[in-house]
Image: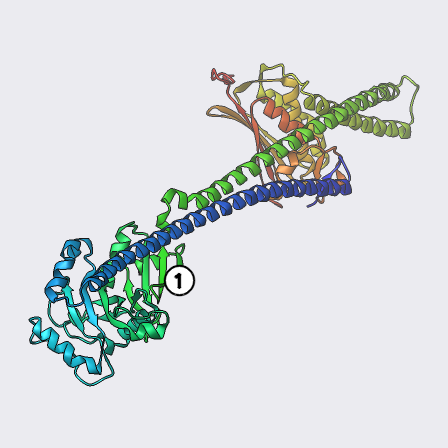
Amino acid sequence: MKLRLWSETSWRGTWAKAKAGAKVRTHAFVVLLVFLATLAAFVYYANSVRNSVHKDVDSAFQQQLRVLSTGTTSRLQLYEGILRGGAGLFFVNKTLTQANWTSYFRPYDIQSQFPDVEGIAFDRYLTTNEVSAFLQSIHEQGQPSFTITPPGERAVYVPTTYMAKYSSPNDKASGYDGYTDPVRKAAMLEAATSGNPTMSGQTRLRSAPNTPTFIMYLPVYADSSSLDTPTERQAATYGFVSVAVNIHDFVTRLLKQNPNKNFGLKWYDAQSPRNNQLVYKSRNFDELAKESDSVIQTIPFTTYQHNWKVTAVVGPGVVPTAERERPFTTLAWGVLASTALASVIWVLISSREFLLNRQKQLEVQTAKDDLLSLASHQLRTPATVVKQYVGMLLQGYGGKLTRGQTSMLKHAYDSNERQLQIINQLLYVARLDAGRIILHKEVIDIGNLLKQVCDEQRIEASQRKQKLVCEIPEHELAAEVDPQYFHMVLENLVNNAVKYTPDKGTITVRARPSQDEMLVTVTDTGIGIDEDRQEMIFDKFTRLDNELAANTSGSGIGLYLTNQIVSLHGGYIEVKSRPGHGSSFTVHLPINESGEGIEEISS
């Protein structure tokens, strides 16, 4: 079946749908553009916030590095002060003893003030010719067991002569020749030739073999020596004052000056023969380095003529959680705000479009109603006049008619009647759309009204050899309706059933009360209606094409009027139909609030 729209041609409908689709796409594009623009602004802002957070993390990182650098420099300067104090003793008296050395450093309170210091020593610089005299003087000072280790002959000896021991108080360091250790030898040579305090790389003391240590050396020169060149300074070297420092305790103490659980580091000896040997790693380093937003940086530095390298890490926790989450919070709010704004704009555009369309539809509908009403009135007047004159001719007012003339006049009269019926329906539609139909309800016998409609339709049904059955209860059924308009409802339903039922078919009309409503059912054995098109039959100016439609007249507004009038009565029409198995239209009329809308009256 095909849907036929009598109000406009199909190409206009297609054009209107295309325009409507284009408008929807335009509106959707505008809303999408607003959404993307707003979201882009929030993304830009969130990225700015994220960059700000990264800057804060980097700033905290740089601050920790500054504290570490300052602390390292300050601490090493304290050790330099100790070295210079020890060297000053030899300008007063070069015949010091172990007791003098220990007594001199006792006021420094090394164990309390410098807990990372393993010991403070004086290492005598000797050539092969000076060893015998040196050993004899040491033995005479009360150290008869003093020997130089490791044994063996070499050009230069630098044994630890005096030792103030702290962290590891044992005698293994006494007499040890540090010049045999390449790490210490390099630091001693640098100190001797430069005349400045020098730091060694990582080494291990004989008194603390499991403790990574660095040693700072300050040269002591012989009196009245020329010290202008490195060679002269090397030749005038008398010995070295040295401070041995526990590297782990040294770095740990530095970190405690500004404790931060979100900062960690690795300390490397960049001049180590092992190539960047790790000498210290904080416990939290690996955990912090795993975090995605951590900042890691490697900084090489040189202090006291030795090259070191520090790899530092700062975790995102250095910045408060609320600040770190701001970019994500901003982005989330951006998505919500963009969606809300786009939704509001869509609603506003849709509402405006709806109001404009509604206004346009009202204007068009008003114009159509006015035109329809005007045309109907203009058509109704001449049609009524034609009806009167043709009727008068059939009644013999114009003289006796032949059989042929009578037949032609009867056809003209019937055609005029159908024209008047269509005109009347158009007038009803115009009034209905304009809201000018007012029901004048009264309690009537629905059975009598239905019997009257069946009698009116029986002639047409009999012409098509159809069986029209009216099943009306013997007792009278009363309902409060508008007699004129409800008669139109019943007439349209029965007439429709007659039109769309093939010859020799059956139309059955029933009326019965059911709980709180009255049911009037018109059932036929006609061609039926597809389920997906059943709602269309109540649309204005709509007819469905079928094998009987071409042989039946109609305007496509009968069922529209029927449905609207039933709705005005507070009821509805139920349709049940299958193609090839007929149709059933049931009018449901409700009882009014007092429960007296429908009554049974005994006969």
Residue in the picture at 35% in, 75% down: 231
| Residue lying farthest to the right in this orientation | 399
Q: Secondary structure at mark 1?
A: strand
Q: Is residue 500 visible?
A: yes
187 left or right, relative to 591? left
Residue toward you, 377 or 493: 377
Residue in the picture at 47% in, 43% down: 332
Q: Quadrant of residue 370?
A: top right
406 left or right, relative to 129? right
Residue toward you, 379 or 414: 379
Residue at mark 1: 298
| Residue lying farthest to the front in this orientation | 224
Q: Quadrant of residue 190?
A: bottom left
Residue toward you, 400 or 569: 569
Q: Position of residue 64 (x, y in %)?
A: 35, 52
Considering only vertical position in the picture, is 393 above or below 535?
A: above
Task: Give the crowd class for mark 1: few <14, some 14-19, many >=20 residues within 10 Å.
Answer: few
Q: Position of residue 23 (x, y in %)?
A: 69, 40
Q: Is residue 454 visible?
A: no
Q: Amino acid at mark 1?
A: Thr
Considering only vertical position in the picture, is 338 above or below 156?
A: above
Q: Quadrant of residue 194?
A: bottom left
Q: Position of residue 246 (x, y in %)?
A: 22, 63
429 left or right, relative to 113? right
Q: Position of residue 357 (x, y in %)?
A: 69, 31
Considering only vertical position in the picture, is 426 above or below 255?
A: above
